[in-house]
Image (spheres, rainbow, N blue to C red):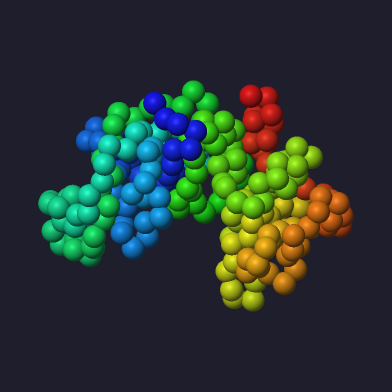
């Protein structure tokens, strides 16, 4: 159905009504002002479930659907029974979907984290074991190495320092702090490791007491 390079957009699904709309009516909405670049290019749309879906399903991707098309509409056109909604006149992409397809193996997030959209490709989506496998960046090689060493890094991870929020290429939660990694010219906290090699990361992780392995790790390794 899909080619390796086809775009896949992962979007947040934070309530059951929107999931039922996607499943039963075949569409999903994305506010135009927050829509990522691949919104109009995606061949498939996948859904990241929040805690609204309960302990068993939260923080995971379990369903996706082929994208059949898109159009720009106002919210009042999507929900004519809510004409007084504060965003009634806001513009949304209405993503038209084919039938929802359930993944044989859910793609879990190892830890709780904020996720709005992830832009990826079909080959990564089809092979992913956990959320971090989906991201595409110049940190790919280092990420694979650190994951193989049992550090379980988080990618595209938000951190705050001095009242400023950054998104670093990778972060490794440790017993005594957080190792943050930035690649290239990306803005990052002062203490972030900049373009490190593996040995630099090992030393910093050790200095901070070693990595904190996520609970989901054992389940993923046994898969």
Residue 222 in the image, given as x and y percentages of width and height = 68, 24
Residue 212 in the image, given as x and y percentages of width and height = 74, 47
In the picture, measured across the screen, residue 31 lies left or right of residue 197, that is left
Q: Is residue 37 visible to the viewer in this orientation of the structure?
A: yes
Query: In terms of image quadrants, where is residue 52?
Result: top left
Q: Depth check: give the residue in front, 132 or 51.
A: 132
Residue name at image x 73 percent, y 48 percent: 142
In the picture, measured across the screen, residue 156 lies left or right of residue 89, that is right
Q: Is residue 160 visible to the viewer in this orientation of the structure?
A: no
Q: Depth check: give the residue in front, 159 or 101.
A: 101
Residue 67 in the image, given as x and y percentages of width and height = 32, 38
So how many labels did they put on this image?
0
Above or below for 125 versus 158: above
Residue 77 in the image, given as x and y percentages of width and height = 14, 52
Above or below for 190 versus 172: below
In the picture, measured across the screen, residue 162 lies left or right of residue 208, that is left
Query: In terms of image quadrants, where is residue 197?
Result: bottom right
Residue name at image x 36 percent, y 50 percent: 39
Residue name at image x 40 percent, y 34 percent: 64
For the C terminus, the quadrant is top right
Q: Depth check: give the residue in front, 214 or 164.
A: 164
For the N terminus, the quadrant is top left
In the picture, measured across the screen, residue 113 lies left or right of residue 142, that is left
Residue name at image x 69 percent, y 29 percent: 221
């Amino acid at each position: 159905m899909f080619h390796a390079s086809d775009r896949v957009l992962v979007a947040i699904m934070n309530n059951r009504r929107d999931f039922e709309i996607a499943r039963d009516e075949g569409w999903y909405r994305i506010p135009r002002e927050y829509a990522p670049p691949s919104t109009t290019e995606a061949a498939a749309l996948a859904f990241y479930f929040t805690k609204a879906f309960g302990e068993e399903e939260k923080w995971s991707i379990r369903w996706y659907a082929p994208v059949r098309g898109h159009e720009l509409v106002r919210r009042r056109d999507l929900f004519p029974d809510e004409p007084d909604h504060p965003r009634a006149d806001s513009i949304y992409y209405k993503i038209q979907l084919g039938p929802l397809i359930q993944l044989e193996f859910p793609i879990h997030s190892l830890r709780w984290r904020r996720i709005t959209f992830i832009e990826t490709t079909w080959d990564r989506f089809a092979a992913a074991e956990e959320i971090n496998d989906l991201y595409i960046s110049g940190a790919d090689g280092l990420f694979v190495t650190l994951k193989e060493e049992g550090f379980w890094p988080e990618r595209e991870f938000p951190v705050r320092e001095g009242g400023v929020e950054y998104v670093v290429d990778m972060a490794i939660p440790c017993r005594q702090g957080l190792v943050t990694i930035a690649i290239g010219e990306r803005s990052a906290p002062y203490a972030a490791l900049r373009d490190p090699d593996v040995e630099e990361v090992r030393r910093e992780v050790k200095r901070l007491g070693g990595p904190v392995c996520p609970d989901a790790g054992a389940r993923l390794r046994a898969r």
